[in-house]
Each structure stands twice: as structure tokens, then as C-alpha cells.
Image (cartoon, grey):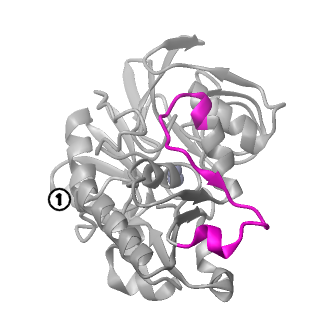
Amino acid sequence: MNSKLLKYTKKGLYCSQADIYIDPAGKTNRAIITHAHSDHARRGSDSYLAHPVTALLMRHRLGSKINVQELEYGRKVNINGISISLHPAGHVPGSAQVRLEGCGEIAVISGDYKLENDRLSTPFEPVKCDVFVTETTFALPIYKWEPQEIIYKKINDWWLRNKKNGIVSVIGGYSLGKAQRILKHLDTSTGKIFTHPVIEDVNEILRNSKFGLPETHRLNENTAYKELKGNIVIGPPSFTGGGSIKDTGKYSIGYASGWLKTRKAWGRQSIDIGFALSDHCDWDGLNMAVKLTGAEKVFATHGFTKQYVKWLRENEISAYELTDIAAEDKED
Ligand SMILES: [Zn+2]
Ligand SMILES: [Zn+2]
């Protein structure tokens, strides 16, 4: 890898001067974690550096005994002469880009990110650098998101329609980020919001950190259909995709994911309606981000790396692919 600060290893991106990995897989001494999604925050490191909200979520997901040093956005720590700081990535609460400076180079690792301010996560902040490592989950021109207000309106209209028809709305989305983003933009005048326990656990953590989430009701085995009628349930993807919920009453199943931008993808989910709401950049967002960093070299990781590198090179930017380190959970 053509960078003074970063190397690409089997365990992931590594800065040898600071002896620190970014979002590693496997055993390491020290790791910086960009955000708490399971394909970024993994067990196996003796010590972690992360944003305080990510640290809370990591303790919940990986166990309270993990050793995490908390670092606020914009604060610097120095390890062996390398200055390290975290900057908002706008992906999910606590998500950060990692900035490393030393050896005459500034490198920024984006983690997952989006430019649109979702009013839940701290908005993305462009960081000037020489080397930019960007994710490319949706790096194809077909991925162009509608403004989020339009999608929230579609979700709220669908809920209202279902209420009028006397049925339950069930919407699926990832339990950290997507679920709370939906939650925060629901029209609570329509009815009550129920949440799957996996999501409610995350809500509780975020409530403690004052993310301004509306009131929710934790779903349990005893929740009767008549309580849910006309109301909305937010569940993780597996909950809505499994189909079991359909057995006990009348439901309309929705799912929120960037992958649903193409109608074909709807067919692969057992859903009644799809909402193309993503916590990643679309094509225009990626190009804007690359431009804003002013980076001379761009490394692409996750997703459509090949296509994006080709595009950047055609536009006279030095670009390279990072081979994915491990099979990834497909996030949206
Ligand atoms: Zn993520
Ligand atoms: Zn990811």
C-alpha cells in the first residue's frame, strides 16, 4: 500500500509507527474502532480507542470487560509521535473517521459514512488529507438516494394507510442507526411505536446519551395483537424477513435499506414495501467526499472497489483497491 502511515495486512489497516490497527479482525494489541457495527467492532484486541458513544455500544455488544479508551471528536492523542484524532462520519451515532498524522503524511480512514445530516448522528465533517481510505458500499451511479424527507413521508403515509385498514405496520432496519433514524422521524400522532428487544437495548443506551428518541414500547412474548393493531413495530432485518410474524394477524411488512433502491432487491426480501434509506453515501456523496478531502491518493474498500477505482483513475485521481479482509455482513 502506497502510504507512509498505513499498511494493509491480513488483520486490516495497520499503522506500524503507532502499532495500531483500524477496525481489525483477529488478535491485536491496540485498535481504533470507527463505529460499533459488527463488521468494524470485533473482539480480539487488548485495548481499543473509540468515540464515547461507540465505547458504550461496544461494551454492550462485546462485553463490559473490554478495555476502551474514549476519545471525543477533534481531540488528539499522540502515540509514538503519531497524532490520532476522530472526526464525525455521519453514519450512525458515535461513528468516526480516523485521522493519522506523522512522517510527513496525513491519512484519513472514513469507516462507513454519509454526507446527509440524519439529525441523529453527528454530521459528517470533511477532513483534509493526503491519503483517503474510503468505503465504497454503494459506489455505482445507480445508487442515488432520494432526499430523506421524502422517504420519511413514504414511511409515515404507509403507517397511516395501514392504521386506517386496521393492520399492524412492521418495519425492519439495522438495530444500530437505521432503527433509531426511522424511530426519530415517525409521526407519533399516528399511533404507538413498539420495538424489538434488540433495538430497544440500543435505544436505552442512546437515551442515556441524549439522542432525543421518542417514546417506545418494548415488544415481548406477551404483547397481544390487539395492542399492536394500527401501531408500528420496528424490528431488526431478520425479524421481518423470517415471515413468522405474518402467522398471527394482519401485518404489512416494510424494510428500510439502501439495497432496495433497485426493485429487483425487493423480490429477495419477503416484504410488502421497501424504503431505500441508507446510512452510506450514494454515488454523488462519495465523489463529493473525495473532492472535499483534497487527497492525492484514494484507497477504496468494501463493496464496489474495482468500479470506483476505475472511475477515479479516469478522473485523474491516484486510486487503489484494498482487498476486503473478511466476508462482511451486508450493511445498509
Ligand atoms: Zn456501519
Ligand atoms: Zn461497514
Residue 31 shows in this picture: yes
| Residue farthest toward the right in the current orientation of the protein | 65
* Disc 1 residue: CB within 8 Å of ligand 2: no
Residue 21 shows in this picture: no
Q: Residue at x 59, y 59 (%)?
A: 194
Q: Where's residue 229, x and y in %?
A: 56, 73
**Per the image, is 226 magenta?**
yes
Q: Residue at x 68, y 85 (%)?
A: 248
**Per the image, is 201 magenta?**
no
Q: Start and end of the magenta stretch? A: 206-229
* Label 1 neighbour load within 10 Å: few <14, some 14-19, many 20+: few
Question: Could you tell me the amino acid type at mark 1?
Answer: Glu
- Give the overall secondary structure of the magenta segment: loop
- Depth order, front residue of 217/51: 217
Picture layout, residue 60 above or below residue 260: above
| Residue farthest toward the left in the current orientation of the protein | 315
How many marks overall? 1
Q: Where's residue 109, x and y in %?
A: 44, 37
- Depth order, front residue of 108/42: 42
Picture layout, residue 80 above or below residue 43: above
Which quarter of the picture shows residue 127?
top left
Q: Where's residue 209, x and y in %?
A: 57, 28
Picture layout, residue 318 above or below residue 262: above
Residue topped by disc 1: 314
Which quarter of the picture shows residue 290?
top left
Picture layout, residue 246 above or below residue 143: below
Q: Where's residue 159, x and y in %?
A: 41, 69
Q: Residue at x 43, y 44 (%)?
A: 91
